[in-house]
Image (cartoon, coloured by chain):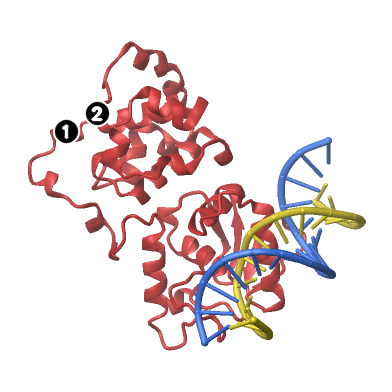
Chain colours: A red, B yellow, C blue
Amino acid sequence: MSVIPSTPLDSQLTTSWGLMNSYADGSLAMSGYSSRLWPHDSQPQFWSKYQVWEWLQQVMDIHQIDASSIPFQNFDMDGQQLCSLNYQDFIHAAGSAGHILFHSITELKWSGNYHMDIGQLEFKPELDFPCVFPDVSDPLGDIYDMTSVHNMAPDASPTPSSPDPRGTHLWEFIRDILLNPERNPGLIKWEDRTEGVFRFLKSEAVAQLWGKKKNNSSMTYEKLSRAMRYYYKREILERVDGRRLVYKFGRNARGWRESEK
DNA sequence: TCCCCGTTTCCTGATT
DNA sequence: GAATCAGGAAACGGGG
């Protein structure tokens, strides 16, 4: 399969793309999109699976596409595979959002990066991050690598009863998204960093990501939030009254404070 | 096999 | 009316 860089279809799509470029926030415009998010490895051919997911999230954020409208599992692929998809493949994989995704990836592929010198072609995606990627087949792999780093600290074990230092628990999953915002843009954000207060921005997208991690395609925010509420009793989370989608880390949550990093 | 833990699923009712 | 929150109850899967 191959992607045709410039077809009549492209010109049909420029209307929606033009709209995107007209956003008041210039950082959301496509021209700034690639440089802001992919400062070194903006060639999608070299993306890891996880970077493909990041791109997907960004496009959904920019276009305010409901995360549940795109089956993430259809994009369980690395950048090379992604770039080999044609327009019909995108439509098949993402439905009505397919044309947006197709145009986005075409833009990134042909946005001047092909003019880079041969030295840049030797770039490896994992070099862009401070941590290693032992398993690039796991889109969340880097998150859990970071968890491992946190747990190197003597008192950084999640809870006394936690059996898995790699961070398989939901609250650790949430914490690691918060600690790596550049890799999970727009999913969850700190409301009060020092107090450990955070808010879900894309609750269903986080639930899908959690479901992906647990091989549970039927995960929803409804179910995820029930699991979150069980943390109140264990004081891993504290209630934040009157605020929707807002939670706060409790006394038994470890590794979220900046001083613990 | 049993038990415990950490969810997951389903539910009802309340609140925003 | 939809989305979210709260929490009870039962079930499930993994680990010890």
Q: Quadrant of the C terminus of chain A?
A: bottom left
Which residue is depicted at the point 52% across and 37% down? Answer: A70
User: Could you tell me which chain the residue with mark 1 belongs to?
Assistant: A
Residue holding disc 1 = A114
User: Could you tell me which chain the residue with mark 2 belongs to?
Assistant: A
Q: Is residue A232 above or below residue A138?
A: below
- Given residues A153 and C15, the one toward you in this image is C15
Which residue is depicted at the point 37% across and 26% down? Answer: A103
Q: Is residue A43 visible?
A: no
Q: In this view, does C11 lie above or below B3?
A: above
Determine the CA span between mark 1 and mark 2: 7 Å
Q: Is residue A8 visible?
A: yes
Q: In this view, does A168 lie above or below A32?
A: below
Whether residues under marks 1 and 2 lie with C-beta atoms below 8 angstroms apart, the answer is yes
Amino acid on which disc 1 is placed: Tyr
Give the image quarter of residue A140.
bottom left
Residue A251 coordinates in the image, percent (x, y) = 62, 81
Amino acid on which disc 2 is placed: Trp
Q: How many marks?
A: 2
Mark 1 burial class by Cα count in 10 Å: few <14, some 14-19, many 20+: few
Residue A103 located left or right of residue A113: right
Residue A184 coordinates in the image, percent (x, y) = 45, 53
Residue A79 coordinates in the image, percent (x, y) = 29, 42
Please, what secondary structure does the residue beneath circle 2 have? loop
Which residue is depicted at the point 30% across and 66% down? Answer: A131
Q: In this view, does A206 lie above or below A256?
A: above
Residue A124 located left or right of residue C4: left
Residue holding disc 2 = A110
- Given residues A52 and A32, the one toward you in this image is A52
Give the image quarter of residue A109.
top left
Q: Quadrant of the N terminus of chain A?
A: top left
